[in-house]
Amino acid sequence: MNAWTAAALVLLAIPAPTCLWVAARGTAVRRLLGASMLSTVAGAVFLLLPMAYDRSSYQDLALMLAVLAPAGTLVFARFVAGRRHDAHPYGSTPEN
């Protein structure tokens, strides 16, 4: 075990379970925050593991996660969290 592997294990042991707990409980905003932070921690782990195993091709996974994680956050915010209750169903305000 080298320092890169130890750093990845620390990230998997402390922040990852915390992010999972936040993503599983609470309001929609807190769940969104937990999922976003979990993707950040996973990206950091996926950047540390190629250094630990001396395989640069594994960095492609971190790059894919960095590109797709913000899109996943937007999808969660748009479709899962729902709309505001005071918003008009068709996106415009009715005329008085």
Image (cartoon, rainbow, N blue to C red):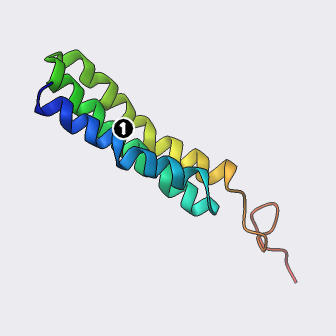
Q: Quadrant of residue 49?
A: top left
Q: How many marks?
A: 1
- Foreground: 62 or 22? 22
- What residue sits 20% from the left and 23% below the top? 50
Seen in the image, is 86 located left or right of residue 35?
right
- Residue at image mark 1: 42
Task: Name the amino acid type tagged 1.
Answer: Ala
Label 1 sits on a secondary structure element that is: helix
Seen in the image, is 32 located left or right of residue 62?
right
- What residue sits 52% from the left and 41% below the top? 72
Q: Position of residue 95 (x, y in %)?
A: 85, 78
Seen in the image, is 9 located left or right of residue 53?
right
**94 relative to 3, above or below:** below
Q: Position of residue 73 (x, y in %)?
A: 52, 48
Observer able to see residue 36: no
- Foreground: 75 or 47? 47
Q: Quadrant of the N terminus?
A: top left
Q: Position of residue 59 (x, y in %)?
A: 25, 24
Q: Quadrant of the C terminus?
A: bottom right
**68 relative to 17, above or below:** above
- How many residues crowd around disc 1 within 10 Å: few (fewer than 14), some, or many (20 or more)? many
